[in-house]
Image (tube, rainbow, N blue to C red):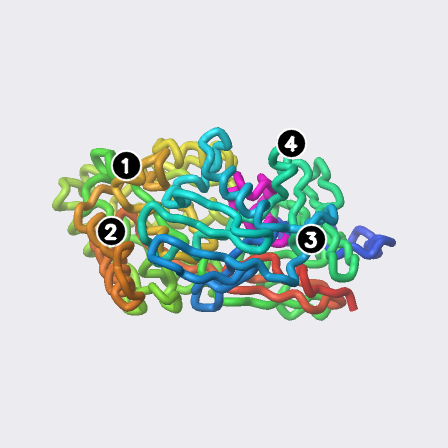
Amino acid sequence: MIRWRLLLLLTAVLLTPACQSPAEDVIRLGIAGRPANLDPLHATDAASARVNRLLYRSLVDFDAQQRPVPELARWERLTPTRYRFHLDPERAPFHDGAPLTAADVVATYRAVLDPATGSPHRGLLSLIGQVSAVDADTVEFLLNRADRLFPGYLVIGIVPARLLAQGHDFQRAPIGSGPLELIERGGDGQLRLRRRSDGQQLAVQQVKDPTVRVLKLQRGELDIIQNDLPAELIGYLDGREDIRIERHRGANFSYIGFNLEDAQTGDPRLRRAVAHAIDRAAIIEHLLAGAARPAGALLPPGHWAGHPELDGVDYDPDRARALLSELGYGPQRLLELSYKTSSDPLRLRIATVFQDQLARVGIRLRLQSYDWGTFYGDIKAGRFQLYSLMWVGIKTPDIFRHVFHSASLPPGGANRGRYRDAQTDAWIEAAEAAQTQTEQVTYYRRIQARLLETLPYVPLWYEDHVYAARADIRGYRLNLHGNYDGLLEVQRR
């Protein structure tokens, strides 16, 4: 199918006159997923997070090892439960010219914590007992309990207090203090942006189909395309004089998740059989063009709390068959399972490979693909046996409580597989109560080893980031999390 699409793409390029770049100087980035929400109090999807970090500024960002560092503010830990943040005196104003003050920080976090707001970030920040302004440049947070990870939680984009009080629709008209500001948003999924430093106009354009994205890049209708490109398209573009491809190691964690309350997938032997049946190396080589590395845990090895000795579950189809035999399955009694995925072309191709690999050990996988909204809604509601997703932009190890603690079943967290393990709970709580980072690392490594043993997730890979740009584009850079920060420096030569 992909080869035929490539043939059609080439034919279209040859038969259609080459497009000239638009008269106005707009640098256009093409992506697969539409940013769903430009309100930082409510946004959860990866595309929105990547755009919002450029529209808004947050108190805290992260360094290369995912340790929290100041963005809008530096901080001091006055006591284990009391933090004081000092705003950068050189901070930029909001896009409408109003100054950003401590009152805006207080209003933003109080809104997140207000149940009436319905913010999905409220659960993580519920340890905040009180937030108050000391003066126009200083904010204090009083916590309900000690947590050494706390500064890393303060990544919500700050919005103006006066607009919050007026019920302003930040989704429709975002007003932040970030380096980019919104000019307009089109009904075709395009965001038109302006760079505050020099006025350069930028566009973020959703183009779902990867082949169409490549065609638009070749014709000059897009200047950059990033990620979600199958191996054939990367190979097709690689080496062309008019296109430049660059890659960067990524931290986005792909996995297979299970419903542990299901009679079949609740059995750890079945989950391990599935894990042994999947040839990750073949998928990385042939479907991802080598642009990934095998994963053994949710956090990558280079993370300060990562576990560098975990590689995941080995490909061992004989062991998979033996485990299925223990469960009473074999050639005369095949096991049938339901697997849900999105309708994204690359994810569907990976799903069909899973289907083939599992069939070889005696598992008949019934694929169910849906548009993103329907698929994600089913996953959040627990309507699945197996599914595959990717955790994007994970920076702090509080993710283990959010995803694997037995108290984090939806809607109180993202433990969508209903994983309950007393040992994991105890180590999560011990890590949170640890007095030193060294002690925390010990517990987080134990947690990751325990998760690989019990397999609520099958770790697959960390996907690299790949972008292709036209030859006249310079300065676009990728980072570990595939953010769109390259838009801050990109130029047309």
Name above or below for residue 436 compared with residue 13: below
Give the percent coordinates (x, y) of residue 148.
35, 58
Could you give the CA–CA distance between mark 1 and mark 2, rounded to whole angstroms? 37 Å
Residue bearing mark 4: 166
**Cβ–Cβ under 8 Å for marks 1 and 2:** no
Q: Kindly identify the amino acid type of the residue bearing the numbered disc 1.
A: Glu
Reply yes or no: does residue 72 show up in magenta.
Answer: no
Q: Earlier in the sequence, mark 2 or mark 3?
A: 3
Q: Nearer the viewer, mark 1 or mark 4?
A: 4
Q: Position of residue 273 (x, y in %)?
A: 23, 50
Q: Amino acid at mark 4?
A: Gln
Q: For the residues marked 3 and 4, what is the alpha-carbon distance in whole angstroms?
A: 19 Å
Residue type highlighted by circle 3: Pro
Residue under pointer 1? 336
**Which residue is the site of mark 3?**
93
Of circles 2 and 3, the one toward us is: 3
Where is residue 65? Give x, y as percent.
Answer: 43, 68
Task: Assign a secondary structure to mark 4.
Answer: loop
Q: Which-is-in-front pick, marks 4 and 2?
A: 4
Q: Answer with the quarter of the image where residue 335 lies.
A: top left
Dot 2 lies on which element?
helix
Say left or right for 199 vs 146. right
Q: Measured from the top left, where is residue 384 in percent x and y?
A: 34, 34
Instruction: Please report the bounds of the magenta region as a residue range.
Output: 29-54
**What residue does disc 2 label?**
429
Q: Is residue 185 left or right of residue 171?
A: right
Q: Is residue 399 visible?
A: yes
Query: Would you say the residues marked 1 and 3 are in contact, meaning their CB atoms lie under 8 Å apart?
Result: no
| Residue at 21 percent of width and 45 percent of height | 270
| Viewer-closest of 286 and 453 | 453
Q: Residue at x 42, y 35 (%)?
A: 368
Q: Residues within 10 Å of mark 2 (few under 14, many from 20)?
A: few
